[in-house]
Amino acid sequence: MRTFSEQRQLHHSADGLFEIIADVDRYAEFLPWCVASRIRERKADGTLIADLSIGYGSLRETFTSRVTLNSDKSRVTTIQDSGPFRHLKSEWRLAPVSDSETLVNFEIEFEFRSFLLEKVMGAVFESAAHKMIAAFETRADSLLKR
């Protein structure tokens, strides 16, 4: 299983960052190798059922995940329900440092079901994971003017 984690202090409010992370429908606009994203269902408890398609060259894979949005806006956890992964879990943790500063922790762990897919897409997906927090930071900089 591959894992990646990164921590950064961003110059934005935790609430603003949480809204960007929770806006799954817009991921394809800014995340590396995300070619489509959509929320299929919003549950009463705040959980989302979402589809995400990742692509690289002619390869494209779609997976469905359960996205849990903590009511205190401090954490977003995503676990794959179906798709090409044997295991996929990501978590964003947001800790306000001040009204305009937030400590952001991003962690992801994944393993593809297929050995062939792991060989072809594993390194690409890992590279995308490394770029995710930077993509969210860039998105926040453009949407949450300081």
Image (spheres, grey):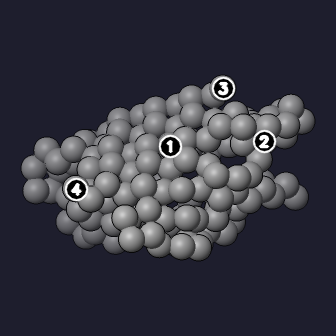
Q: Residues within 10 Å of mark 2 (few under 14, many from 20)?
A: some
Q: Nearer the viewer, residue 117 or 85?
A: 85
Under circle 4, the secondary element is loop
Q: Picture quarter containing residue 50? A: bottom right
Instruction: First in sequence, mark 1 or 2: give its number.
Output: 1
Instruction: First in sequence, mark 2 or 4: give its number.
Output: 4
Q: What residue is rendered at 61% in x and 68% in y?
A: 37
Instruction: First in sequence, mark 1 or 4: give its number.
Output: 4
Judged from this view, the residue extending furthest toward the top is: 1
Q: Nearer the viewer, mark 2 or mark 4?
A: 4
Q: Nearer the viewer, mark 2 or mark 3?
A: 3
Instruction: First in sequence, mark 3 or 4: give its number.
Output: 3
The residue carrying mark 3 is 1
The residue carrying mark 1 is 90
Distance from the alpha carbon under mark 3 to that under mark 1: 13 Å
Labels 1 and 2 touching (C-beta < 8 A) = no
Q: Is residue 85 in view?
A: yes
x and y percent of residue 93 in the render?
Answer: 33, 44
Q: Amino acid at mark 3?
A: Met
Q: Residues within 10 Å of mark 3 (few under 14, many from 20)?
A: few
Instruction: First in sequence, mark 3 or 1: give its number.
Output: 3
Under circle 3, the secondary element is loop
